[in-house]
Amino acid sequence: MIKNRTLLILIKTVIIAIVLCACNLPAMGTSTPENNNIQENQSADINNPPENTPINNPNIITQTLDETATPTITYTPTYLPSPTKTPVPLANLPKSNCASLFVEKDVTINDGTKLKPGEIFTKIWRINNNGNCAWDSNYKLLFYKGDQMNGPEESMAYFLNPNSYIEQKIGGWPDKIYTVKPYDTVDLAVILQAPDKPGVYTGYWLLANGSGEVIEPMLWTQIIVEEELVYDLEDWSGKWTFKDSYITIPVLVSGVLNRSDSGQVTGFFYDHKGDVNLIDGWITDDPNVIEGDFGEPRSKQGGIPFRWKILDNHNQFQGVFWLGQLTANEICGSRHGYDIPDPCLLNE
């Protein structure tokens, strides 16, 4: 009897001990405070990427504020040009305290576009004025560094309505927008030429106001040329220096000409005001003479007729253009490295 009572007491003691231990264990499916912290941190990582982690957003444009950024191209050229200009560090240039821009897209010539050597093209960026001041008619596009692609050191900023129909010809552009208000979006256009040797070419540009203060970020265009173009001195093609006769004291401006197999001669030059002028001409019965028109792509009055004759050295030409039916004006040019002919006026 005593043995049975002792055994019963021992069994009860064991049961009580088991119950007390069970009370101190965490229940199934319940997190400790440490586990709660881990779950909260994991949730925060998913919804709040770390500060320097890029977000996979297809709408983000690759143009950035970093002046050292260069688009990546896998093509390996046989010829790599050296930069034609040593730029002032971007940090040392005067900056506008109220103007800034955001690049929405490349409308034409995406990075890595393949072009023929010597091909003339129109580069267009779509940009948004995300600053606090308006852009006016004094704004300019400045070449900053890299490959200039026969573009100007500076030109007027051609602000155009987005999605406008644009042709690379005299009168082929819509009217320029003279005021771009904050939050407005416009297209910015410049005419350039692909180099004549194989390579990957990247040119960097800056928008600047009338006081010379630059607007960040930089703009760039990058192209690939896979062939080489060899010019024949008798075909007019190549780089030329033009005598800009629009003003009383003529100045020299740079331009290019391309002659096609059909005898058409096209090209462009930027005049003393920074306005681009397109050239549309053809070879006459005399292979040394071309006739045609030149004028701005935004001109609504058509082009200005001209007649040019290349001299026997094939490095200079004399010419004439007409403003109206009776007024003849001199215009002439020379290949780079040669003097302008004297006289300039073509007399025949």
Image: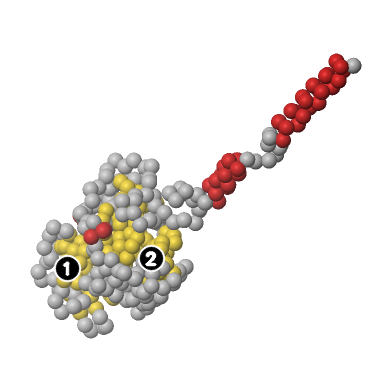
User: Measured along the vertical axis of the image, is residue 208 above or below residue 73?
Assistant: below
Residue at the extreme front of the image, as rendered: 2
| Location of residue 264 in the rendering, given as x and y in whole percent from the top left corner | 32, 62
| Location of residue 133 in the rendering, given as x and y in whole percent from the top left corner | 36, 74
Which quadrant does the N terminus fall into? top right
> In this view of the protein, which residue sits in the foreground, 337 or 131?
131
Q: Residue at image x 26%, y 56%?
A: 145
> Relative to residue 277, is residue 130 drawn left or right?
right
Secondary-structure class at tag 2? strand
Q: Is residue 46 visible?
A: no
> In this view of the protein, which residue sits in the foreground, 89 or 33?
33
Three-letter amino acid code of the residue under disc 2: Leu
> Relative to residue 86, is residue 56 drawn left or right?
right
Q: Which mark is residue 101?
A: 2
The residue pinned by badge 1 equals 252
> Relative to residue 330, is residue 66 drawn left or right?
right
- The span from disc 1 to disc 2 (Cα, nearest Å) is 33 Å
Three-letter amino acid code of the residue under disc 1: Leu
| Location of residue 153 in the rendering, given as x and y in whole percent from the top left corner | 23, 63
User: Measured along the vertical axis of the image, is residue 250 above or below residue 23?
Assistant: below
